[in-house]
Image (cartoon, grey):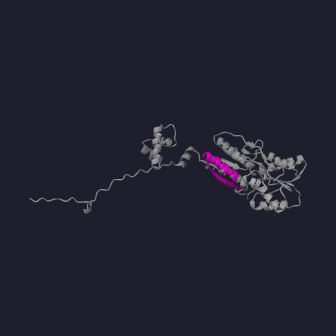
Amino acid sequence: MTIVMKKRKTAKEGVTAPPPTITQPEIVRTLADLARIAGVSTGTVSRALADKSIVNSETRERIQSLAKRHDFRPNQMASKLRSRRTGFVGVVIPLGHERRQHISDPFFLTLLGHLADELAECGYDLMLSRVIPDGTKDWLEKVTRSGMVDGVLVIGQSDQFDIIEEVAAQYEPLVIWGHQRAHQRHCVVGTDNLAGGRLAVEHLVATGARKLLFMGDAAGIEIQMRLEGAKAAAAAAGIALKHVKITLAGEDMGPQIEKSLSSRFSYDGIVAASDLIALSALSALHRIGKRIPQDVQVVGFDDLPLSSYSAPPLTTIRQEISRGAKLMVEKLKERMGGKNTPSVVMPPILVVRESTRSL
C-alpha cells in the first residue's frame, strides 16, 4: 500500500495569510460626533465641556476624557457667537488735533501695555485702532457698531469731545481716558489736569522761577486744562507765563523746541505738557548751553518710566497710568454688564527730581 503524504503549503509557496484587521480611530470634528460616541445629546456635550454642574460629574468627566482622547477642540468662535460675545475689546486712539502723532509715543505705549495686561487677566483680547477723524463724525460709531467688539476703550478725547458724547448716548460699554467736564455723559478715567498745571507752576515759583514757558498744543482737552491751571497759578503769583505751541509729531517737535528756547524771550522755568516734550526740552537746553536747574528749571507731565533716566532726572506731574488702566477695564466690565458707572478723576502727584531746584 502506497501512502501519499500531502505537504502543507507555506506562505513561501504562494499561500498568503489574511492581513490583520486595523480599526481606525473615529474622527471627531463636531459636537454631534462626540455626542454620538458618548451616547448623549449635543447639549449635554456642550454643557459638559463648559464644565457646567447641571451635568453630573461622572458624565462630565467621561465626555471630557473622550474629547481629550480624540483631540477635540470646540469651535470657540461659534461658541462666542451663540453667547453674543466676541471676546474682543476695541482700543481706539483718536488723533483729531495732532494727526502726525504716532502710537509709538511713550505715553500711548505705557497705557496700552497696562490695558493689554488688564484685559488679558479678564480673558479679553485687544483690537487696536489709530483713527484720524479727518472731518468725519462716524469714526467711533464704525467701531461700536462693527459687531466685532464687546466694548470700547478710547485713549484721549483729542478735539472729539462732542462726537464721543453723541456715541455715549447710544452705546453704553464705552470708557475714555481723558478729562472730566461738568455734566458730561461719557465715562472718563483720568487725571485732574487743571490741578496738575497749577501744581507744576506752584513748584517752579516756590523754587525761584519767575519767567515761565508752557510748552504744548492746547487743542486737545487735557493739555488745554493743564495750560489753564498753569496760567491761573502764574497769575496768582503775579509772574509771566508764555505759551509756546509744540507739536507731538516726533520729526517736528525737537526743532520747534530748540527754536523756541533759542528765542529772545527770557525764561527760567518750563512747564511741559508731557514728559516727551520735557525730555526734548532738556536735550535742547544742553545744546544751547543752558544749565539745568541752575539756569532753567523743567517740569514734565505724566511720570513715564523713562523720566527718571534722563540727565538730569525729570521733575514731573505723575498721572497714575497703571491704576487708571485698571479702573478703565473695571468700569468697562461693569458697563458691559449693564451698569451706569461714574467717572473717576485721579489727583495729580508732584514727583521732584533733579531738573528743578530743592526747596
Q: Give 212 or 359, whichever is nearer the viewer.
A: 359
Image location of residue 299, percent across then percent down: 81, 52
Q: Which residue is more in the foreground, 243 or 305?
A: 305
Q: Nearer the viewer, residue 334 or 345?
A: 345
Q: Which residues are magenta?
A: 109-133
Instruction: Give the image quarter of residue 313.
Output: bottom right
The foreground one among 61 and 350 is 350
Whether residue 189 is in magenta: the answer is: no
Q: Quadrant of the image for the N terminus?
A: bottom left
Q: Indicate left or right for 216 with 152 as reference.
A: right
Which residue is painted at 42% across and 45% down in the image? 37
Whether residue 167 can be seen here: no
Q: Quadrant of residue 289?
A: bottom right
| Image location of residue 290, percent across then percent down | 85, 59
**Residue 137: % across, % down:** 71, 52
Residue 188 seen in the figure: yes
The question of residue 123 being in magenta is answered with yes
